[in-house]
Image (tube, rainbow, N blue to C red):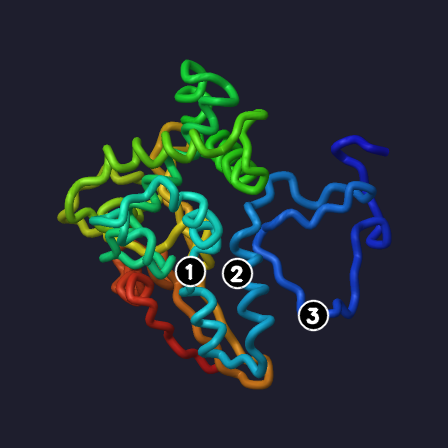
């Protein structure tokens, strides 16, 4: 059966064992075999799994601290591969020169990271407008699921060096011009990316003095990096899509390193309710013995 309620045995799915590299890596990326049942319907772009694979290829004898650093890694492979394509359109002064020599890591106080973020947003917009038209793009890209499809179109355009049969160069130039118009002197990445958390049931409607919500704070997370995080709109409401429970353990021990954003209690009157917010923001793991 090929219907939505079809059932398959394990042997019918894509399978693999003992890969040559001696590791498996995944980050919600597409691992589909076109001749096998579908295993993921909304795959992420490959930048995160590419970064994981790159780190694993170049390091052995991984420790708990290494795995923690994985979860905090903000190096952008997408920026690494795209900025060389931008160089013909970048000046050798000011923020454009900073973008040229940027280390490709998102930090809250980074100016070039801010320009990169604006550029990629404008690239997605320019590619989307070329595909569906300037009139249709704003309404079609409003919701996060549709927006993410346009992000995939932009990444595909970068890979193929063309957009709907047209050369990529003019699209890059347009996106850069628009991003420079939006960039203001001294802007940093943390001005554009902020983490917030509202009580699920009250949705930010309670007064701030009650202390149930977490006010927006700068974050160095990003769409395409291992420390993944985006701020978008879903069903008309602002939403933060980011790492939640962070958990690392060495299976040869009984010790767990973890961060639970918010806290271990859902009771709004408990002192545990927001106990780990600061740990989450500053990436401080607690240690538990099981």
Residue annotated with mark 2: 51
Give the position of the N terminus as an image quadrant.
top right
Give the Cα separation between the discs numbered 1 and 3. Answer: 22 Å
Give the Cα distance between marks 2 and 1.
Answer: 8 Å
Q: Residue at x 60, y 44 (%)?
A: 43
The crowd level at tag 3 (other Cα within 10 Å; few <14, some 14-19, many 20+) is few
Question: Does any portion of residue 290 appear in the rendered image?
Answer: no
How far across and how far down the image is residue 105, in percent?
36, 59
Nearer the N terminus, badge 2 or badge 3?
3
Choose between 121 and 145: the one closer to the eye. Answer: 121
Report how far apart the C-alphas of labels 2 and 3 lie in the structure.
Answer: 15 Å
Q: Is residue 78 visible?
A: yes
Q: Quadrant of residue 18?
A: bottom right
Residue drawn at (23%, 39%) of the image: 183
Image position of 136 with respect to 79: above or below: above
Callout 3 secondary element: loop
Describe residue 12's horizontal placement relative to residue 218 as left or right: right
Q: Which label number is shown at residue 75?
A: 1
Read off the residue under disc 3. 21
């Amino acid at each position: 059966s090929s219907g939505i309620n079809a059932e398959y045995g394990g042997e019918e799915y894509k399978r693999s064992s003992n890969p040559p590299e001696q590791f498996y890596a995944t980050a919600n990326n597409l691992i589909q075999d076109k001749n096998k049942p579908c295993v993921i319907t909304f795959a992420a772009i490959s930048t995160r799994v590419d970064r994981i694979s790159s780190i694993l290829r170049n390091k052995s004898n991984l420790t708990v601290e290494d795995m923690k650093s994985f979860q905090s890694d903000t190096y952008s492979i997408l920026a690494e591969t795209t900025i060389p394509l931008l160089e013909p359109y970048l000046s050798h002064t000011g923020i454009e020169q900073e973008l040229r020599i940027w280390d490709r890591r998102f930090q809250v106080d980074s100016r070039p990271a801010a320009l990169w973020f604006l550029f990629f947003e404008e690239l997605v917009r320019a590619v989307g407008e070329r595909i569906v038209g300037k009139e249709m793009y704003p309404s079609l890209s409003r919701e996060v699921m549709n927006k993410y499809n346009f992000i995939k179109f932009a990444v595909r355009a970068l890979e193929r060096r063309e957009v709907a049969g047209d050369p990529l160069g003019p699209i890059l130039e347009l996106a850069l011009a628009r991003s420079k118009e939006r960039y203001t002197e001294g802007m940093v990445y943390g001005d554009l990316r902020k983490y917030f958390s509202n009580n699920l049931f009250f949705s930010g409607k309670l007064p701030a003095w009650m202390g149930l919500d977490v006010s927006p704070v700068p974050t160095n997370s990003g769409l395409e990096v291992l420390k993944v995080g985006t701020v978008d709109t879903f069903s008309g409401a602002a939403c933060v899509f980011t790492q939640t429970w962070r958990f690392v353990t060495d299976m040869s021990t009984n010790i767990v390193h973890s961060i639970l954003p918010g806290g271990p209690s859902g009771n709004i009157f408990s002192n545990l309710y927001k106990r780990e917010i600061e740990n989450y923001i500053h990436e401080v793991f607690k240690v538990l013995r099981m």
